[in-house]
Amino acid sequence: MTNSNSAVVSVKFIRVFFAIFPNKTTQSLLADQAINLQSLCAGRKITKRHIHLTLLFLGNLLPNRIAELHRIANHISARSFELNLEEIRYWKHNRIVYIQARQFPSELFTLVDSLTDHVSAAGFIVDKRIYRPHVTLIRDAIRPVIVHLDNSIRWPVDEWSLVQSLQTDKGVRYDTLDQWALRKL
């Protein structure tokens, strides 16, 4: 029997992740690659404003946990670095085409490890899989593609962000909740 006086409690989660976003020049170069790749492998290209490299995906959280993430991030210290993206690859299991570096700078892994350690110590659930940095350019690719670029895309990284992913009637929208500067080399 249901009590008509009982209130239904609706908990609204928010979907969040830590990421780095390219500057305008790098963003345009990556968006151009996505356009070129779409003709080779079909699928859906990532929109220019959504191109990013995920540092740590946290998924759905209660909104009251966001302040804790801000406090944690305020204590993270890492150095700026540069990415040289030069290889375009295909992951069959999730049908994405992505770009990556042949070798990623140690500063990227230092930032990711620090974030993962601090967030995990605070009781957040984190993915235990090995971190594989990549920048998705195409989703739902129909055909695989592997390309070595003649010229790498240089991406200077001097800040990182906490981002909320919102599902809207027009698709997904990313809202930056906060940003932190990386120490200059």
Image (cartoon, rainbow, N blue to C red):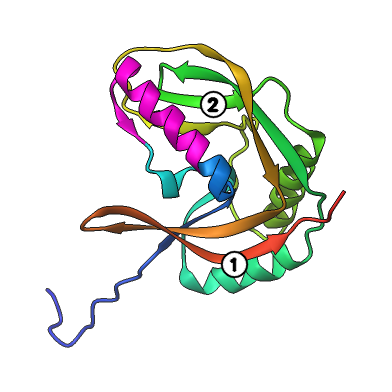
Q: Residue at x 51, y 58 (%)?
A: 163
Start and end of the magenta stretch? Answer: 28-45
* Amino acid of disc 1: Asp
> Which quarter of the picture shows residue 123?
bottom right
Residue 179 position, x and y percent, is 63, 63
Q: Secondary structure at mark 2?
A: strand
* Amino acid of disc 2: Ile
Q: Is residue 152 above or below residue 10?
A: above
Q: Alpha-carbon neighbours of circle 2 within 10 Å: few (<14), some, or many (≥20)? A: many
* Front position in the image: 135 or 70: 135
Residue under circle 1? 178
Residue 52 seen in the figure:
no
Residue 12 position, x and y percent, is 35, 68
* Front position in the image: 46 or 111: 46
Q: Earlier in the sequence, mark 2 or mark 1?
A: 2
Residue 10 seen in the figure:
yes
Q: Residue at x 77, y 55 (%)?
A: 182
**Magenta stretch holds residue 41:** yes
70 relative position to 46: left or right: right
Residue 173 position, x and y percent, is 36, 56
Residue under circle 2? 99
